[in-house]
Structure formats: C-alpha cells, structure tokens
Image (tube, rainbow, N blue to C red):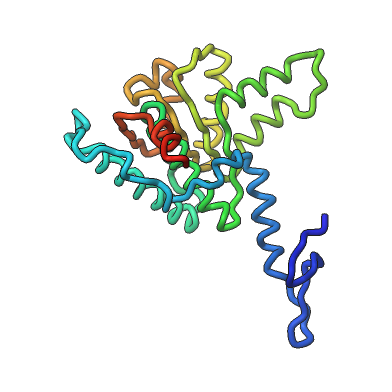
Amino acid sequence: MIVHCDKCAGRGIIVQDGVAEPCPCIKQRVINAKIKASQIPPKFSQYTFDRFNLGYYSRTMLDPEKRISHREIAASTLAAAKNFVHSYLKNNHTGGLLLTGPVGSGKTFLACCIANALLAQNKTLLFVVVPDLLDQIRATYDAARQKTVTESELLDTAREVPLLILDDLGAHNYTDWTRNKIFTIINYRLNYLLPTIITSNINLEDLEEYLGERTTSRIFEMCRPYRLLVDVDIRMQMAKSGF
C-alpha cells in the first residue's frame, strides 16, 4: 500500500546530501499498524492524559472509608496511570493496574490514556472488552459458522501479548466456563510477568464472588487496585458538553 507523504512520495526513503535514509513516515506507518492491531475503537484513540478532566470529580464528596475527596482519589489514580507508562517504558514486566468504579467513572478512559501513550512509543498491546472476547470464543464452537480464528488463537493472543487491557471485567453472569477462560489468561500472564490493565465495575470485596478465588488472588498479586468514584456518570456529562 502506497502512503502519501510529501517528503518521500510514499517510497519510504529520502535522500539527503546524497545519502538515502528512512523517511520519518515509516515510523508513523508502524505506529498506525500497531494501533490497528491493538483493537482500540477509533473513538478511544482520542483519550489522552491531558484530556482526563479532574473537574468531573467532586471536591466535596468523600470516600466513606478513606475520607478523601473523589477528586483526590482521581488525581492519585491518574498519577498511578502515568507512572505505569513510565515504568513500562523502562521495564515491560512492571506490575499492572486494576481500575474499579461505577459505570461512567472514567475507568476505560484512563486505561485508553495508558494505551495511547504507549502506542505513541511504538509499543505492542491489545485492548479487549471481556464480554466481546467471551462471545468470540463461544462463536468458535458454532459448527455452522465459517471460522476465521480458533479458540486457541484468541486465548493465546490475550495470554501472550506484551500488554493486555481487559476492559469491563464487570458484574456479569459468570459461569464455570467463563471463569475458566478468564483464569487461563490471568494465570498465564502472572506466571510470565506480563502486565495487565483491568477495568471493572465490581467492588474489590465482591471480586471473588464473581470471578472465583483462584482468579481474584492472582489479580491482586499482579495488579495494584485503584477505585474511581463519581456522583454523576461522566459519559452523560461529556455528552452534554459535546465531547
């Protein structure tokens, strides 16, 4: 595929002082390819740290346990997300993050801020919505459907990618089958020191009820937990502001 570039006219090479050099557009092509492979929806590609608005979090409403404001919690979580990026760039076996909170509290937004910051640094990662992944795995069991990917390939990709973002590990109707699929991913990544970012609307104290003891204990071992709190769904606020 020929890509338009004013510098190299799509050839990928520029000549300066008689010396042929790779055009800067080559790096951008690689980044674009990794963005596509990451499976981040186009809308989420806009999510960056400088657009994470602490103004959506109350200065006056307090976490009843920590006795600090929702905004202070959000600021701490934002700092942790930025620190993860810095740590990952130095060591791609750094610990992951578990971002919990109610619907519309900014969990996915912040996870995508991490992803986009790392994609800009040419890192490889995968963004997976958990219910969608489970549906894709189930679809491989349908004998009447033409298969383009196998269950093993789906699981191997999630298990082995250098950085995995598991979005919406929520309060769904988990069966032994779904718990087992999630466990195989989490357990592999823990054993091979592969970091994972997880977002969930499940309270920390309720995780075991939904995911089981095996998976929950491994998540706590591999991810540092943070909980975002809001009094009004941020998505609703963003829609009103025309974001």
Task: Give the farthest residue toward the left.
Answer: 67
In the depicted view, which residue is nearer to us: 175 or 8?
8
Q: Is residue 65 above or below residue 17?
A: above
Q: Is residue 114 above or below residue 150?
A: below
Which residue is at a point 61% across and 34% down the rendered structure image?
158
- Left or right: residue 60 versus residue 12 is left
In the depicted view, which residue is nearer to us: 11 or 193?
11
Q: Quadrant of residue 209?
A: top left
- Left or right: residue 155 versus residue 176 is right
Q: Position of residue 214 (x, y in %)?
A: 45, 22
User: Which quadrant: the N terminus?
Assistant: bottom right
Q: Quadrant of residue 141?
A: top right
In the depicted view, which residue is nearer to us: 239 or 128?
239
Q: Position of residue 87 (x, y in %)?
A: 43, 54
Q: Position of residue 238 (x, y in %)?
A: 42, 37
Which residue is at a point 31% across and 32% down the rendered structure image?
230
Q: Position of residue 113 (x, y in %)?
A: 47, 47
Which residue is at a point 65% across and 36% down the rendered structure image?
157
Q: Is residue 63 visible from the viewing direction of this image?
A: yes
Q: Is residue 98 visible from the viewing direction of this image?
A: no
